[in-house]
């Protein structure tokens, strides 16, 4: 562990720390942020009454753009990141110097849990710039004592050349980019297993267990899932340990809840719902009960690794990623899991939605080998039997579908 005294503190001590920090946070927000001050009057501030406090939503962040939720003096801001803005106006995320030090420690935790050790060479192949994935992991790896190579994403041939020469121990990036690295390596006559990678921390997009197995088989590494979002520091909100039994929340920094995404009611342990996060230690722009839109569940019991912070399951999708096709609700990750069960098929695929008259139609394009059409028929049966959907399935030659150096584009909706 990076911070054993914090990651394995007794639960009763952790809960008291959370409640104290929650009270301090609400007091600061009421005094310094008009948006919250108007909504917090008369509320009782204890963990038992957390559900009585108001939610914060993406719409609130957009309405407050650029600095309406700032809780620190502008003179103390040392850095600004931003969300991509793919679902509307981007959100600016300011950090004080203390925020940056806190975030570095949080990221050092996740990378240490993934195997990062003093002197290891770690490639940071996530995007730098406004995206939080690159710089968050960069400073976390340096904090943990690694030698960081900031290769970023976008020049895969350069990454391969450096990896062959330097033999890095670990890599941090979005998981779909690893499939691109493997593809370019194969085209260059390089076996991905010859790059020397032993560990990888992957996040920034929804990915499945079959995808994890594919990455591990291609590179001969151990893959670790990490979770974060720009509005709440960035990577480091939760991370896997060597037990691979869920993702540990950094509960001394984040207070988490699982709610019904429709009603907003708290859900019991084990039920899947929307993750809500309160940033207990963020100075510049702390958020109270922030609705992330990400779907997961709390896992029961303690982890064998000795960490005492609660665990969540793998993020299985987003509330706003759900597709409705002819009355059937569908998450793209469900299709990915089905496709990766066929060894003849590659990981690259697209879901194409169109509307002809009053009806929706779904087609699935996937790269692979299917000379007699049997695999396409099997996928069609699987979609019907497992997901209740009829879809046209086209198996196309490898390299046919467009590639993205950033997050993979899996859905094209023409409706």
Image: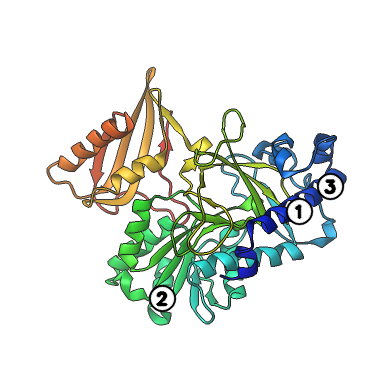
Q: Which residue is farthest right?
A: 31
* Number of other residues with Cα within 10 Å of mark 3, as a class: few under 14, some 14 to 19, many 20 or more: some
Secondary element at image label 1: helix
Q: Is residue 210 above or below residue 76?
A: above
* Mark 2–mark 1 CB contact (< 8 Å): no
Helix, strand or loop at mark 3: helix
The quadrant in which the N terminus is found is: bottom right
In this orientation, which residue lies closer to the viewer: 210 or 249?
249
Label 2 SS: helix
Give the mark, 2 or 1, whose residue is nearer the N terminus. 1
Indicate which label's residue lies in the foreground, 2 or 1. 1
Looking at the figure, which quarter contains the C terminus?
A: top left
| Discs 2, 3 touching: Cβ within 8 Å | no
Q: Which residue is mark 1?
A: 21
For residue 324, the mark is none
Tell me where residue 413 appears, x and y as whole percent.
Answer: 43, 34
- Can you give x and y, in whole percent of width and height, for residue 264 in the image? 62, 32
Q: Quadrant of residue 131?
A: bottom right
Q: How far apart in space, not on screen, are marks 3 and 1 (Cα)?
A: 10 Å
Residue 397 left/right relative to 159: left
Q: Badge 2 is on which residue?
A: 163
Residue 3 visible in the shown view: no
Residue beneath the point at 69% across and 36% down = 51
**Mark 2 closeness class: few <14, some 14–19, many ≥20 residues within 10 Å:** many
The residue carrying mark 3 is: 27
Query: Residue 316: horizontal and vertical position, in percent?
Result: 45, 44
Front: mark 3 or 1: 1
For image coordinates 42% across by 50% down, the residue present is 207
């Amino acid at each position: 562990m990076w911070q054993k005294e914090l990651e394995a503190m007794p639960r009763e001590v952790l809960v008291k720390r959370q409640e104290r920090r929650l009270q301090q946070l609400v007091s600061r927000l009421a005094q310094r942020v008009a948006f919250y001050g108007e909504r917090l009057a008369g509320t009782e501030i204890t963990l038992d009454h957390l559900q009585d406090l108001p939610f914060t939503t993406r719409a609130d962040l957009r309405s407050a753009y650029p600095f309406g939720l700032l809780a620190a003096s502008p003179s103390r801001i040392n850095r600004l990141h931003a969300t991509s803005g793919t679902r509307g106006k981007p959100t600016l995320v300011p950090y004080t110097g203390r925020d940056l030090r806190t975030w570095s420690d949080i990221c050092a935790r996740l990378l240490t849990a993934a195997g990062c050790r003093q002197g290891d060479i770690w490639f940071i192949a996530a995007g730098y710039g406004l995206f939080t994935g690159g710089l968050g992991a960069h400073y976390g790896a340096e904090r943990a004592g690694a030698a960081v190579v900031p290769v970023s994403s976008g020049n895969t041939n350069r990454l391969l050349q450096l990896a062959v020469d330097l033999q890095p121990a670990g890599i941090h990036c979005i998981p779909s980019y690893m499939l691109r690295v493997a593809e370019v390596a194969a085209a260059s006559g390089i076996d991905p297993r010859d790059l020397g990678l032993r560990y990888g921390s992957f996040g920034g997009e929804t990915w499945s267990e079959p995808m994890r197995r594919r990455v591990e088989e291609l590179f001969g590494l151990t893959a670790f899932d990490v979770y974060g979002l720009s509005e709440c520091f960035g990577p480091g909100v939760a991370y896997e340990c060597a037990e691979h039994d869920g993702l540990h929340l950094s509960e001394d920094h984040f207070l988490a809840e699982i709610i019904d995404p429709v009603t907003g009611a708290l859900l019991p342990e084990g039920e899947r719902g929307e993750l809500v996060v309160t940033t207990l230690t963020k100075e510049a722009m702390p958020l109270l009960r922030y609705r992330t839109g990400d779907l997961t569940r709390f896992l029961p019991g303690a982890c064998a690794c000795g960490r005492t912070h609660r665990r969540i399951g793998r993020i299985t999708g987003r509330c706003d990623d759900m597709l409705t096709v002819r009355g059937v609700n569908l998450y793209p990750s469900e299709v990915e899991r089905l496709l990766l069960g066929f060894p003849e098929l590659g990981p690259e695929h697209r879901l194409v939605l169109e509307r002809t008259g009053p009806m929706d139609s779904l087609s699935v394009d996937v790269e692979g080998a299917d000379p007699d059409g049997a695999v396409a028929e099997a996928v069609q049966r699987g979609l019907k039997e497992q997901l209740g959907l009829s879809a046209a399935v086209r198996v196309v030659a490898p390299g046919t579908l467009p590639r993205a150096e950033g997050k993979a584009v899996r859905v094209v909706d023409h409706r």
